[in-house]
Each structure stands twice: as structure tokens, then as C-alpha cells.
Image (cartoon, rainbow, N blue to C red):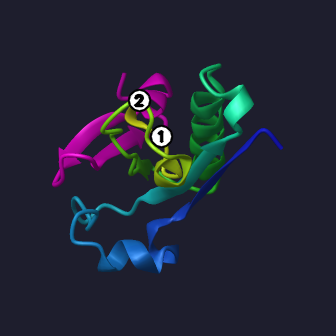
Amino acid sequence: PIGWCAVAPRSDYIALERSRILRPVDEQPVWSVSCLFVRRDIRRQGVASKLLSAAVEFAGKQGAKIVEGYPVEPSNERMPDPFLWHGVPSAFKAAGFQEVLRRSKSRPIMRYLVGNSMR
């Protein structure tokens, strides 16, 4: 595989429920992108945004109205790969997500409204 993306109802991700930084934005039911990774030699070719678009499409077919992502804002260009497994904001923006809240300098909460693109 050249990449992967995990998406499921937020309630399936127990760690999100314990996070102070990534606690729910509101009472809306959301699906969450918990993992996004692209093989190093394929990066910077738009694969991440295509994976995110596919995740939104899949979640929408399952009834999701909102898909959230929790990318990491790189502190520099050479951030180690293990710290980027949530994706980066630019990939989410390219897929039509918009930042809705930031409780931490490095962790924006981004959303895509299914069926009503936020673009």
C-alpha cells in the first residue's frame, strides 16, 4: 500500500474521549479520522487529500454528517514521521476540511460537513 486512512465514529476512539486538547467541539455526532499516513516516496503528490476525500465519502455512505480530523501542525520541515500519523493541516484543507477550533498551537480540529462542503 502507498498509504492508509482510518475513519470511524468518534465514539469508537476511546483515546479521543480522554484527550483535553481534542475533546468534543460540541454535541454533534461526528466521525473521526484517527490515522492518515502516506509512504515517504509518494508524499507531496496529493495522496493524503485523496485518502481524506475517500474517508469522507465512506463516512457519508454510513450516515455521517460531520467528519473531523486532528492533524499535527509541523513545528519544522523535518518533523519525524511518527509524529505525523494524524496527517498535516494542508492535506485536510486540500480535501475541503476547515479548522473549527484549536486548543493547542500544534493540534487544530478540522471538520468537513458531508453533503454540504465547507469550501
Image position of 52 (left or right of 18): right
User: Where is the N terminus found, in terms of image quarters?
Assistant: top right
Q: Residue at x 66, y 47 (%)?
A: 58
Q: Specify the farthest residue to the right.
A: 1
Residue 84: percent from the left, percent from the top?
49, 47
Whole-angstrom CA distance, mark 1 to mark 2, is: 31 Å
Does 5 sit above or below residue 31?
above
Q: Is residue 48 found inside the magenta-colored segment of the image?
A: no
Q: Which residue is mark 1?
A: 114
Residue 73: percent from the left, percent from the top?
33, 40
Residue 16: quadrant of the picture: bottom left
Give the mark nearest the N terminus, 1 or 2.
2
User: The disc labelled 2 sits on which kind of residue?
Assistant: Glu
Q: Can I make out residue 111 in this image?
A: yes
Q: Residue at x 48, y 30 (%)?
A: 91
Residue 39 vs residue 16, the one in the foreground: 39
Q: Which residues are magenta?
A: 90-119
Q: Secondary structure at mark 1?
A: loop
